Image: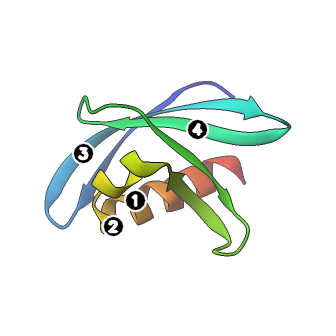
Amino acid sequence: MQAQNFELLVDGVPYMIKATPYDFNGQLRFTVSYNGSEDYIFTRDAEAGQLTAIGTEALDIPDNLEQAISEKLSSITE
């Protein structure tokens, strides 16, 4: 799978997303940035049953945007 670029409109705000997949110990993860932001790591959360941002930096992502990115990435990987 190659890098994906897509647009999302969340709460009336447009976001340009760049998501690059990579393998980490046999698990698919994504490096994600939006509107030129720093990179965030998204990985599958078994408890939540969806992709979520991890690390302390993840707190900077608006909740609704994180959810929208997760849904989009999940639709791409299915």
> What is the CA distance from the residue labelled 3 to the residue labelled 1?
11 Å
Q: Earlier in the sequence, mark 1 or mark 4?
A: 4
**Image quarter of the C terminus:** bottom right
Measured as percent of width and height from the top left, residue 62 is found at 27, 61
Look at 83% across and 35% down and name the residue there. Answer: 25
Q: Are circles 2 and 1 on residues that touch, CB within 8 Å?
A: yes
Q: Which residue, given by chain and number where applicable, does mark 1 sit on?
A: 66
Look at 49% across and 48% down and name the residue there. Answer: 55
- Name the quadrant containing residue 27: top right
Q: Which one is nearer the viewer's eye here, 62 or 16?
A: 62
Kind of residue at disc 3: Tyr
Q: Which one is nearer the viewer's eye here, 25 or 1?
A: 25
Kind of residue at disc 1: Glu
Q: Which residue, given by chain and number where applicable, does mark 3 sit on?
A: 15
Tag 1's secondary structure? helix
Q: Which residue, given by chain and number where applicable, does mark 2 sit on?
A: 63
Circle 2: is it few (<14), some (14-19), or many (20+) Cα within 10 Å? Answer: few
Q: Earlier in the sequence, mark 2 or mark 3?
A: 3
Kind of residue at disc 4: Phe
Q: Which one is nearer the viewer's eye here, 68 or 30?
A: 30
**Image quarter of the N terminus:** top right
